[in-house]
Amino acid sequence: MYPKIGVAIFVRRDNKILMHKLLVPGASFGHWALAGGHLEMFEGVEEGVLRELAEEAGPDVKVTEPEFWTIANVPCLEDNNHYVTLFFVADWISGEAQVMEPDKCEQWGWYEWDNLPDPLMVGIQTLKEKGMTPFKMNAIKEKRVFYINVGQLPPNRAEAFLNKMQDALRQIGINQDTEDYFVPVRDGVTKIEVFTKDDKDQWVKENSHVIEVMQNIQIESLEAKLELSRQKIEQLRKKRWWNRFAQPLRQLRSGF
C-alpha cells in the first residue's frame, strides 16, 4: 500500500473558514473538516479540489481561483489510512454551502481560525499546532524566475553572461531577493515569471524596465560579439593579403 494524495480547501469569508462536521464511520466521525477528498487519476490538483467543494458543499458555492498553500503528512492508524494532503486557499464569492452528502456530512458552518470547533481533522490540527494560518499567505516571499536568452554561447561564457545580468539587476535595485532564479535558455525569449500570491501581473507592469535592462545587456553583448567578429575578419583579411604575396616572395628568395 502507498499513501493517497488528498486535496482540501480553506474557503475564506470575513476572517472565517468554511467547515463541515463529518458523519463518516471510523476515527473521523464527528470531526470537523474542510471541503476535500482524494485526487482522482489524471486529475489536476486545482480541478480536484474544486470538484470536491462542489460535490460536498454544492455547485452554488463560488470561490476565487484556488492557490496552493501548504502540504501535510496525514497518517491515520485507526482507519489504516495515510494521506499526503495538499491544502489550497480561496476566497468566497457567492452561494451558501448545502449538505450534499447527508450520509457523510451533518452540517456546514463558518468559523474563525482562532475559534475552530472541536475535534478537528488531523491535518488541520497539525497546521494549527505549527502556528500556521491561511490568512497570512501574502507574507510569503515573492519568487521570480529570470529566463535569459544566452543564444549559442558555450556553457562557461553563458555562466559569465548570467553573472553579468545579475550584477546589472542589482545596480538598479532588483535582484535583492534570495528567492530569485536565473535560467539560461537557448533560442528562447528573455522574460520574467513572478510567483506572488495576488499581484504578479501588476509587478511585471510596474517593472517593465527590468526587461529593457536585460535586453540592453544582451544587445551590448551582441554588439561586442559583432565587434570581435569584425576584428577577426580584419585579421583574416590581412592574413589572406599576406598569403597572396608570401608564395612569390619565397620563390624569389629561393632563386638567390
Image (spheres, helix red, strand yellow):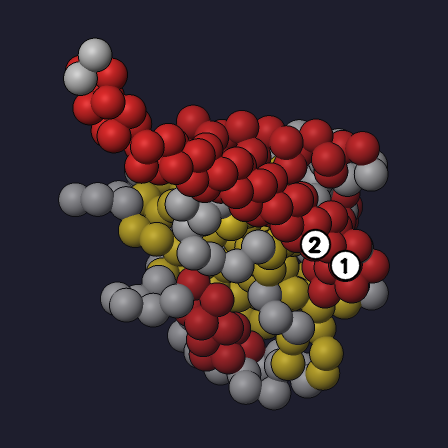
The answer to whether residue 88 is left or right of residue 254 is right
Q: Residue at x 83, y 59 (%)?
A: 206
User: Type of residue at label 1?
Assistant: Ser
Quadrant the C terminus occupies: top left
Query: SS class of the residue under badge 1?
Result: helix
Q: Residues within 10 Å of mark 2 (few under 14, many from 20)?
A: some
The answer to whether residue 47 is visible is: yes
Q: Residue at x 63, y 31 (%)?
A: 164
According to the image, label 2 marks what residue? 211
According to the image, label 1 marks what residue? 208
Query: SS class of the residue under badge 2?
Result: helix
Quadrant the N terminus occupies: top left
Using the image, determine if residue 51 lies above or below residue 221: below
Q: Position of residue 148 (x, y in %)?
A: 54, 47
**Circles 2 and 1: CB atoms closer than 8 Å:** yes
Q: Quadrant of residue 47?
A: bottom left
